Image (cartoon, coloured by chain):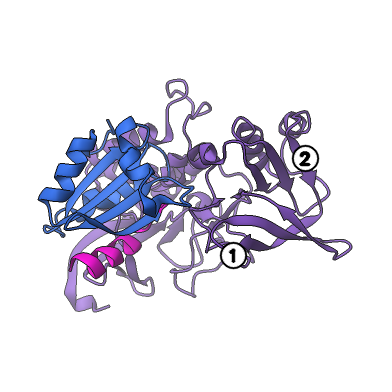
Chain colours: A purple, B blue
Amino acid sequence: MNPNQITESFDVIVLGGGPAGLTAGIYLGRAKLKTLIINEGSVGGQMVLTHAIANYPGAKVDISGRDLSLDMKAQAKAFGCKIESNVEVTGIDLSGDQKLVEIDEDEVFSAKSVIIATGGTPRPMGVEGENKFKGSGVSYCATCDGDFFTDKKIIVVGGGNSALEEAVSLTQFASKVTVVHQFDHFQATEHAVRMAQENDKISFILESEIQRVLGDQAITGVEIMNMKTKERSIVSTNGIFVLIGYIANTASLPDSLALNARNEVIADETMATNIDGIFVAGDVREKRYRQITTAVSDGTIAALSAIEYIQS
Amino acid sequence: MLQTNLKHITTENEFSQAIANNENVMICCGRMGPMCLPVYDIMENLEEKYENVTFYDMAFDSPHAHVIRNHPKSAGFMGLPFTYYFKNGEAVEATSSIQSKKQVKDILDIHFA
């Protein structure tokens, strides 16, 4: 990355165009700071994965994640933010006073401050056969792909709210749903657990993990290991829905940025990281609760902190 | 009809015309769902760069979409969207489920360069 070939300079670059990044953009734009939002995927981040958002204050009932994303994007643009979507970040240098971000190995942008709001991506199982059957039996989105499994046997991996709620939802298509979870208890709410337990189509394999996905042209089963006894068994299935949370998108960030053991960015209450002028917001940050509302809160705080940093 | 800025294929006849009248064609057959939206966005983003490719979407639940749903290359597909790449009327590549911009570009570069 050549700092002498800077395409354009900004006050703040926001990495990520989910609710945290867009909110930061809205606040920065309103403060008349020249702001660039760089987004590697579609604007909205994981928010677009939600078909109906019922708990975002003030939004019309059951607004889709897509619509809320477009509203936030329009708001950020109205306040003057420039947005680069579907680009690849190919270089980041946060070491100097001018922070540099390269996209598509082509353009280099500089800024006095950077807000990292790169979010998370669905956590894969990381087992043999998973990649081979992505899109042909292994899915990370029950609402998208559920109807491909009509009258088929499926496995849902996970023990949180998403896993159990989607397991219940998938029973409208599948003939049988088996929930495989690594612990002997669930992280989901009591209500979600009860709904799943009361569903006749759902059975549970606890304290177990999938070791391999089996099949040639299509999935025929999985090899499961009991975590306590180490006993292995084969369970036949036509498909697997993997709903075991998210991993923070920090792989492309510089090593100098302080991360916790789960590779989430560590920050204080002002969203400041260990690097001067670098702030963090949203699901990529070390925190307990990950909601659209908490991402919006993070984005607000990060933007206000960046404004204060630049003005000081 | 899908709410995208892409050209839409809504009938079997339009599908036939699209792949007959254009040398390089990419068709994303899906819904307005979370795995499909990023692919539409990527296609809209690439339209300017790949002027030699004609980009279309097609609603997966339309009866006319059987031309994609039942295409031989769709065998085993169990994830939306179904994305097809046609060269001179022949399907040269097809993918199932969400794709990254790099994955789409790699296919375009291999088949339509």
Residue position for label 1: A129
Closer to the N terminus: mark 2 or mark 1?
1
Camera-nearest residue between A263 and A27: A263
Amino acid identity at mark 1: Gly
Residue in the image at 38% along x and 56% along y = B95
Q: Are marks 2 and 1 on the same chain?
A: yes
Camera-nearest residue between A239 and A23: A239
Amino acid identity at mark 2: Ser
Q: Label 1 neighbourhood size at 10 Å, few (<14), some (14-19), many (20+)?
A: some
Residue B5 point in image, percent of width and height = 21, 39
Residue in the image at 85% along x and 64% along y = A231
Chain letter of disc 2 in the image: A
Determine which of the numbered discs, if any, sits on residue A249 in the image: none
Examine the structure image and report whether residue B28 is included in the region drawn in magenta.
Answer: no
Vertical placement of residue B25 versus A53, above or below: below
Residue A40 point in image, percent of width and height = 35, 57
| Magenta residues, start to end | B96-113
A281 to the left or right of A192: left
A1 to the left or right of B69: left
Determine which quarter of the picture holds residue A215: bottom right
Residue position for label 2: A203
> Helix, strand or loop at disc 2?
strand
Give the alpha-carbon distance from disc 2 to disc 1, as whole Å: 23 Å
Residue A205 point in image, percent of width and height = 79, 48
Q: Label 2 neighbourhood size at 10 Å, few (<14), some (14-19), many (20+)?
A: some
> Helix, strand or loop at disc 1?
loop
Residue in the image at 20% along x and 49% along y = B55
Q: Are marks 2 and 1 in contact (CB under 8 Å)?
A: no
